């Protein structure tokens, strides 16, 4: 993310920082929809004792979801928003949260990189910016990079939402990585989840 993109991203979440519930402070009015997205991400995680990097972790709710599934591996959450990282650290002091971009963490590796919701807000990014993030996720993952987004097959366009042409993205993924790709589409209308696998586990 470029500095002006980080500024716009942070402004959105600062505006929600006084809301009551953790899901509301990261822009989810409906916690059920948030957890449906999480469950589609973790569907592809084959080992709950593995190492995970949560990209765009917000206030750490994905970690809470992982714990509910019996997760006992190592976890690192990464986000550019300092207040959300501070909240995550207070909620879950036993794990690591970094106020950074994944690209800034040069020595980091894990089994799985997860990203839920971080592509959905339009902070001035392009599809090329999204591809850069996915490249980095695949690069640091020993097993899978797993992410979700909102497709372009919508009957209305909401201002402030970033839409991704899923089929264009999948064609690029196949050309870029020549790795197995799995897509789940339809759990929430117009939403999709993609897993890029470096192993079969």
Image (cartoon, rainbow, N blue to C red):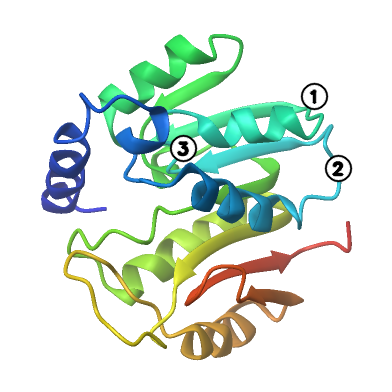
- Write down the quadrant of residue 193 in the picture: bottom right
Find residue 47 and name its label. 2
The structure residue drawn at horizontal position 43% and vertical position 54%, both measured from the top left corner, is: 117
Q: Determine whether 91 is above or below 78 in the image.
A: above
Residue 172: x and y in percent read: 53, 85
Question: Foreground: 16 or 133?
Answer: 16
Left or right of 91 in this view: 139 = right
The residue identified by callout 3 is 57
Q: Earlier in the sequence, mark 2 or mark 3?
A: 2
Question: How busy is the neighbourhood of tag 2: few (under 14 within 10 Å), some, or many (20 plus)?
Answer: some
- Write down the quadrant of residue 76 in the picture: top right
Find residue 7 and name its label. none
Q: Secondary structure at mark 2?
A: loop
Left or right of 127 in this view: 196 = right
Residue 154: x and y in percent read: 37, 85
The residue identified by callout 1 is 72
Question: Foreground: 52 or 187?
Answer: 187
The structure residue drawn at horizontal position 16% and vertical position 69%, both measured from the top left corner, is: 159
Cα distance between the residues tagged 2 and 3: 20 Å
């Amino acid at each position: 993310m470029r500095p002006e993109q980080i500024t716009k991203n942070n402004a959105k979440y600062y505006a929600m920082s006084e809301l009551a519930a953790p899901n509301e402070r990261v822009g989810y009015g409906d916690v059920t929809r948030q957890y449906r997205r999480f469950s589609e991400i973790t569907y592809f995680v084959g080992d709950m004792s593995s190492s995970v990097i949560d990209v765009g972790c917000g206030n750490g709710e994905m970690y809470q979801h992982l714990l509910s599934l019996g997760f006992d591996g190592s976890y690192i959450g990464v986000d550019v928003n300092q207040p959300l990282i501070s909240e995550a650290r207070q909620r879950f002091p036993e794990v690591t949260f970094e106020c950074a971009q994944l690209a800034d963490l040069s020595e980091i590796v894990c089994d799985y990189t997860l990203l839920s919701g971080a592509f959905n807000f339009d902070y001035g990014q392009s599809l090329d910016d999204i591809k850069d993030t996915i490249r980095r996720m695949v690069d640091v993952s020993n097993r899978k990079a797993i992410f979700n987004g909102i497709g372009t097959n919508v009957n209305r366009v909401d201002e402030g939402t970033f839409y991704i042409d899923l089929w264009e993205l999948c064609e690029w993924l196949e050309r870029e990585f020549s790795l197995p790709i799995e897509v789940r589409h339809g759990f929430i209308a117009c939403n999709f989840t993609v897993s890029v696998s470096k192993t079969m586990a």
